[in-house]
């Protein structure tokens, strides 16, 4: 495997969106993707709220990881949260996913982060097995909660309790 990595640049916003759509299709969630190239340019490159690295083989981007910093109050330091990791189907089984995680761990270490974490869909057994093989620890006592769309706006617009 001859893989290199590079950070995404503004001109890659369309490719990032293509990777997101491919991931969403794999996860049977394509209808939930409302991201646009312009939104990605704004939030990733103008506001710097996330970063993207590509796994590159012979000049072709074969995988990507989108991540951002979070913070652990218990550790008293930042961490990296991996939002998406995706390797194109034709390149799976060649070690690119492992290489991307290795690169993210290296970035986290270089930045002094206390941890690298992510979520995985319960039905995605191939990914779960892959993460376990990398010695990742499942956080089985934790449940993710989310407010989005109308629910987020309703809470934001509701009167505060006195």
Image (cartoon, rainbow, N blue to C red):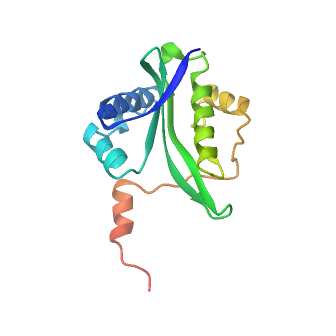
Could you say where residue 70 lies in the image, as x and y percent from the top left?
54, 55
Could you say where residue 138 lies in the image, as x and y percent from the top left?
70, 42
Q: Is residue 87 left or right of residue 155?
A: right
In this orientation, which residue lies closer to the viewer: 19 or 147? Answer: 19
Could you say where residue 80 lies in the image, as x and y percent from the top left?
56, 48
Q: Which residue, as the protein is rendered here, is positioned at the far left?
A: 38
Identity of the residue drawn at 36% across and 68% down: 156
Image quadrant where one finds the C terminus: bottom left
Kindly indicate the quadrant of the structure image that contains residue 104: top right
Is 130 rendered above or below residue 92? below
Image quadrant where one finds the N terminus: top right
In this orientation, which residue lies closer to the viewer: 94 or 110? Answer: 110
Identity of the residue drawn at 56% across and 52% down: 144
Q: Which residue, as the protein is rendered here, is positioned at the far front?
A: 110
Identity of the residue drawn at 42% across and 17% down: 59
Q: Is residue 57 left or right of residue 1?
A: left
Number of marks: 0
Is 146 rendered above or below residue 134? below
């Amino acid at each position: 495997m001859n893989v290199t990595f590079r950070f995404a640049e503004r001109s890659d916003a369309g490719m990032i969106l293509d990777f997101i759509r491919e991931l969403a299709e794999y996860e049977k969630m394509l209808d939930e993707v409302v991201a646009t190239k312009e939104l990605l340019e704004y939030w990733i490159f103008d506001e710097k709220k996330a970063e993207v690295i590509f796994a590159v083989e012979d000049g072709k981007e074969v995988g990507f990881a989108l991540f951002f910093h979070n913070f652990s109050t218990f550790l008293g330091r930042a961490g990296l949260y991996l939002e998406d990791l995706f390797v194109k189907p034709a390149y799976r089984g060649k070690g690119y996913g492992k290489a991307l995680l290795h690169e993210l761990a290296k970035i986290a270490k270089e930045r002094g982060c206390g941890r690298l974490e992510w979520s995985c869909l319960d039905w995605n057994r191939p990914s779960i097995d892959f993460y376990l093989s990398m010695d990742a620890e499942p956080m089985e006592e934790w449940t993710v909660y989310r407010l989005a769309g109308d629910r987020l706006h309703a809470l934001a617009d509701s009167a505060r309790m006195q």
